[in-house]
Amino acid sequence: MDSQLQIQYAPFSLPPRNSRTQKVFDGEKGNDYRRQLLPSYKANRRKLSQQVPASQRFPRSSFGRSHKLTLYVLQKCNVPVVKIEGHEADDVVATLVEQVLQRGYRVVIASPDKDFKQLISQDVQIVMPVPELDRWSFYTLKHYIAQYSCDPQSDLSLRCILGDEVDGVPGIQHFVPGFGRKTALKLLKKHGSLDNLLCAAAVRTVGRQYAQEALTNYANFLRRNYEVLSLKKDIDVHVEEQWLSRRDTRNDSVILGNFVNLLREKQNLCWQNRSHSMH
């Protein structure tokens, strides 16, 4: 499969020349589905944003203008923009990836979001930012296995057991302190996935007594974690033929040059206003 489609999640960057590219944004109330399942989902992010002093926050009107400007730039650069109301961009990307693979393409997801690692395969790679090197770098299945010593689906199951503090998803150790990473890895290595592990624990003993009791007593808790952390692939969005054609890049230099200059002007103006307010 020599053809390749790049799908970019919200962070703005210049798509490669002669690439097939599309940009995906979060829809309004996209987190509602997961927050209904787990109210603490991404609650830490909301708390952190509220802790920022009002004087240091950008006005909502400024965010709105910036968003519209970004959409304008993408349109001028011939980059399709996808936004499905009521759904997170992660799920839209996962759905599109599945459809693109079925058409015989390989996929590159450009995003710093760790959740996309569960989509990695021989035909799905991620381009992630490397802050210390001030550049973006490819992250492949080979890199993943070298880093985690397991396949992507096993790692998703591991996150469901241990939780994800950043996203506000509690782990089983909140109820069973002795059930840690070592125990989880050992059980998943033997059973392959969380579902297989829970099904096995329901009919026979799979480990020490504390682990057995944890898996049977908190099976619904773990399955809820899986539903929250796993990306949905059934969003009502469909790949359009025009997204699979090579992008016209003739306007890139001028449009993006003007965009960068405007951002610098806005940043300078913002710093000037803050300086005046402090005095």
Image (spheres, helix red, strand yellow):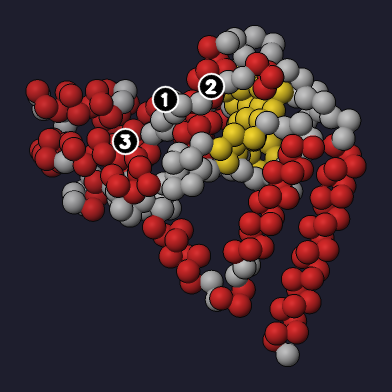
Q: Nearer the viewer, residue 38 or 197?
A: 38
Q: Secondary structure at mark 1?
A: loop
What residue is drawn where x is 33% and y is 54%?
40
Q: Nearer the viewer, mark 2 or mark 1?
A: 2
Q: To which residue does mark 2 refer?
A: 238
Q: Amino acid at mark 2?
A: His
Q: Nearer the viewer, mark 2 or mark 3?
A: 2
Q: Kindly give the residue lying farthest to the bottom in the view shown.
A: 279
Whichever of labels 2 and 3 marks the residue nearer the N terminus, that label is 3
Residue 120 image point, x, y percent: 52, 26
Give the Cα separation between the discs numbered 2 and 1: 10 Å
Residue 51 image point, x, y percent: 48, 72
Q: Would you identify the image quadrant in which residue 240 lies?
A: top right
Residue 86 image point, x, y percent: 44, 41
Q: Secondary structure at mark 2?
A: loop
Q: Nearer the viewer, residue 191 or 99?
A: 99
Q: To which residue does mark 1 refer?
A: 234
Give the Cα separation between the discs numbered 1 and 3: 16 Å
Q: Would you identify the image quadrant in which residue 17 lies?
A: top right
Residue 172 image point, x, y percent: 24, 46
What residue is drawn where x is 35% and y is 44%?
34
The local crowd at label 2, few if under 14, some if 14 to 19, many if 20 or more residues have their Cα within 10 Å, is few
Left or right placement of residue 84 versus residue 168 in this view: right
Q: To which residue does mark 3 refer?
A: 226
- The answer to whether the residue labelled 2 contacts the one labelled 1, judged by CB atoms less than 8 Å apart, is no
What quarter of the picture does the C terminus occupy?
A: bottom right
